Amino acid sequence: MFEPLIQAVREMATIDTSLVLYQFEIYNALKGDTSTVTDISRDETDWKSIARDTSASQSMRIEALHHNRNQKAAPTALRNLDAVFDTLVA
């Protein structure tokens, strides 16, 4: 999709296609939140169990599902961020 653009600017700029930040849903989920991807990846709360807890309120169970989704996505997003950072500082 971007290949024609890359070819057009190849002589005008240095393009390193290894410097790609992929779009992860966790970024949208964290908009307006004070938590970071690193914070979420370190969170050891068992959100899945909370989501399954029938004694918890429905709103709490829904919130737990969102936290669980973010908790699962965080390690992949963090690896991507780390890889790009490592390439930039190398």
Image (cartoon, grey):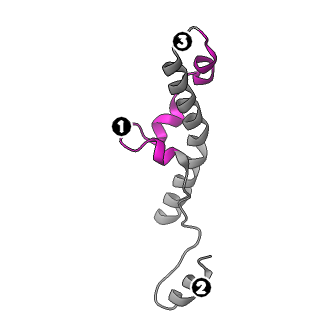
Residue found farthest to the top: 55
Query: Quadrant of residue 32 in the image?
Result: top left
Mark 1 sits on what residue?
34
- Report helix, strand or loop for mark 3: loop
- Circle 1 Cα neighbour tier, 10 Å, few/some/many (<14 / 14–19 / ≥20): few
Looking at the picture, does residue 29 appear above or below residue 3? above
Looking at the picture, does residue 82 appear above or below residue 87? above
Q: Which residue is more in the foreground, 89 or 7?
A: 7
Q: Amino acid at mark 2?
A: Pro
Query: Quadrant of residue 68 in the image?
Result: top right
Percent position (x, y) of residue 33? 37, 38
- Circle 2 Cα neighbour tier, 10 Å, few/some/many (<14 / 14–19 / ≥20): few
**Left or right, 88 with reference to 17:** left
User: Residues in magenta?
Assistant: 26-54
Q: Are marks 2 and 3 in contact (CB under 8 Å)?
A: no
Q: Residue 62 lies in magenta, yes or no?
A: no
Mark 3 sits on what residue?
56
Q: Residue at x 59, y 35 (%)?
A: 69
